[in-house]
Amino acid sequence: MNTYPTSPALPVRPSRRKGFTETLAVVLWAITAHALGLCLVVVAMIAVWGAAAGTPVGEFLLPVAGVLAAAALVLAAAYQGLKLFGLSAPTRSAIVAALACPGPVGLALYLYAG
């Protein structure tokens, strides 16, 4: 029998580090998604113009879809591979977002500024 008095449970405060990595992951993924969306708009415009000109657009869209699928597989493998290091989910997501961000952002800057 427990003879010690029970104290009320103290509220658990989330660590500042977890909040930072969650915020960092969200910001990086938002930047990546926005840049990728801008690039896909350009791809869609080229495909529509090509279709309007009567050229087959499948030859153009297939490599784009292949690159996106390959990038998704590599990022998913990196996310799962980081489990081996015992990292938390927000930290893994922030690392993978940092790996995913430069490609679409660089391409979007090249397309719209150059």
Image: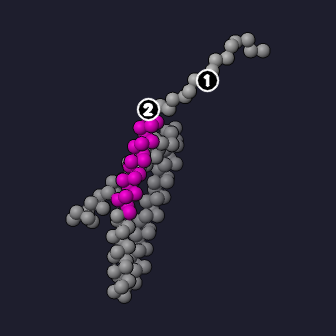
Kindly give the residue lying farthest to the left in the view shown: 114
Is residue 85 visible in this depiction of the protein? no
Position above or below: 9 against 54: above
Q: How crowded is mark 2: few (under 14 residues within 10 Å), some or many (20 or more)?
A: few
Q: Is residue 102 left or right of residue 26?
A: left
Residue at the disc numbered 1: 9
At 46% from the left edge and 56% from the top edge, which residue is drawn? 74
Position above or below: 35 against 63: above
- Asked where in the image residue 58 lies, by quadrant, the reply is bottom left
Earlier residue among tags 2 and 1: 1
* Main SS class of the magenta portion in the image: helix
Q: In this view, does 87 lie to the left or right of 24?
A: right
Task: Check residue 47 in the rendering and tell me which mark sits there, or answer none.
Answer: none
At 73% from the left edge and 11% from the top edge, which residue is drawn? 3
Residue 6 position, x and y percent, is 67, 17
Q: Which amino acid does label 2 sit on?
A: Arg
Residue 13 position, x and y percent, is 51, 29
Residue 42 position, x and y percent, is 33, 70
Between the residue at mark 2 and the residue at mark 1, the CA separation in whole angstroms equals 21 Å
Kindly give the residue lying farthest to the bottom in the view shown: 54
Residue 44 lies in the magenta stretch: no
Quadrant where the N terminus sits is top right
Q: What residue type is labelled 1?
A: Ala
Residue 102 position, x and y percent, is 33, 54
Q: How crowded is mark 1: few (under 14 residues within 10 Å), some or many (20 or more)?
A: few
At 49% from the left edge and 39% from the top edge, which residue is drawn? 87
Span colored in magenta = 17-37
Task: Check residue 16 in the rendering and tell me which mark sits there, or answer none.
Answer: 2
